[in-house]
Amino acid sequence: MLQRSQFNYFVKREDGILGYNARTGIFALLSDHIAGTLQSSDPIKSVKSEKELTNMGFLHNGDEIDQIISIFEDERHQASRVSLTILPTLACNFSCDYCFQGDHSHGQFMSPNTQEASLRYVRSLLEEEGRSTFDCTWFGGEPLLAKETVINMSRQLNALAENLGLPCPDMKIITNGTLLTPSTSKDLSEVGVSFAQISFDSLVFKGKHKRGVMDVNGDPSIILKNIIDANKYLTIRVRINVSTENLSEVPEIISYLGKYGIENIYAERVFAHENEFASNDDSGCTVGSCGDCRSEDVSRIKESSSLSRADYASFEKEHFLENISDNPVKFKDLVKKLVPKKHFCGATLGNMHVIDPAGFISRCWHSAGSPAEAMANVHKLHLSDNASDIARRWREFTPFAYPACHDCKVLPLCMGGCSHPRVFMNAAEPPCDSIKHHIQFCVDQVGSAIDLRLQNSANTSEKATGAK
């Protein structure tokens, strides 16, 4: 039976009503008749251009959730790409009180033996049937505390790709930027690292605790100086970690970065991972294995700076989504929010392999450094990582088992959100993405600015363009 999609949204424009479907990511300029039919609650008897509207997702036959589930499951069987995250160390030269990894003061470094074993493991992955490409993210801790490991292993990953007849991997690094000197940026670029993400959480730089954009004299901080120089060698993406402590500073942070031509900026909220996702019982929770989330002091610090999802959504709307049609970078980020996902991340997709300094292999960045959440270890390759109970948890995880996700009108845009708290913490609350709080606003913003200059079809009055 022909039905209206539950993922339809509409925008009024001078040239008519624009429809957007979150399952397909398609915008279409609709005739008055069709717009009225799609917005009505009356039974659909017949509609002009039924085939086109069905192809665009505005109408459907059967269960459209089944179609989303089919895409989700089919993607899990795509074996062409391998995504690596390698942590050469869990040590860090900062002590951010909100860091999900807790205390870094005794961080481990990856030994030469573990480096070799990790490369053997990567080779075994790439030799599997159907592999055609791979990427690698250097993470930590602060990975540049182990710069030589990053450089040497990057060279060996490139050599491995050449040996197997694969393209060299796309490589990037997540760093706090304090050690990203011009010479280090050049060295990274020469071994194929092309991208760096660097975070700020304060206006003023304060020792090991606050990563500010300026020093106490108002000059660029060491991090910003390094970013300015690194732009010669790397593509830099700046992230602002937003908390209750720095909300009022963020506009100044953005403005100050803009003075130096830094516009590739996005934000993420700070939250107490273990408090926000506390389960109704502790069965199956492995997060406490390190002891950090059981510490009342650490928990209290994180909780005090945490932003609720609703508060962050309001902040994001005001500072990153409003009045951005003349800002290509921010507008592109806004459009990305309306592009349907097949999976939230590589953890549920099954192609993510996170290797920590001890050689433990996990699916998720949040699991790095936690043996209890590892699937296997690179030193024991005779034990298949896919055979472990942890691997089974990831394989069997599906966001569609949760009513809050199954019935959500933004499901195709977030695909259940971060799965880690559900896999390991029996999370009682859904990890909703901010798009849930301002989906109509985002559709209005893109729909008002999008250019639908397509030729009129002889058979339909719709003009369509995709968000993807």
Image (spheres, grey):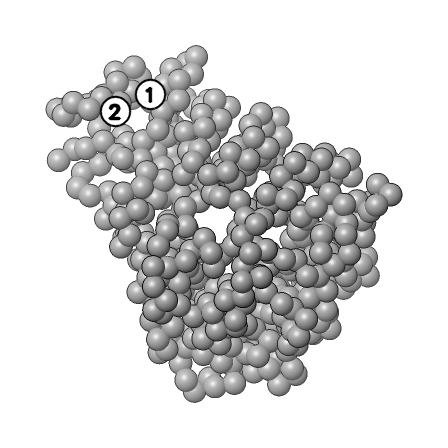
Residue lying farthest to the front in this orientation: 296
Quadrant including the N terminus: top left
Q: Nearer the viewer, mark 2 or mark 1?
A: 2
- The answer to whether residue 136 is above or below residue 51 is below
Relative placement, left or right, of 172 versus 282 is right
SS at circle 2: helix
The one nearer the camera, 119 or 445, is 445
Q: Residue at x 60, y 59 (%)?
A: 99
Classify mark 1: residues with Cα within 10 Å, few (<14), some (14-19) or many (20+): many
Residue 57 in the image, given as x and y percentages of width and height: 29, 35
Residue, disc 1: 30
Q: Residue at x 33, y 20 (%)?
A: 30
Residue, disc 2: 38
Residue type, label 2:
Leu
Quadrant including the C terminus: top left
Residue 74 visible, this angle = no
Q: Residue at x 61, y 36 (%)?
A: 329
Q: Residue at x 84, y 41 (%)?
A: 218
Residue type, label 1:
Leu
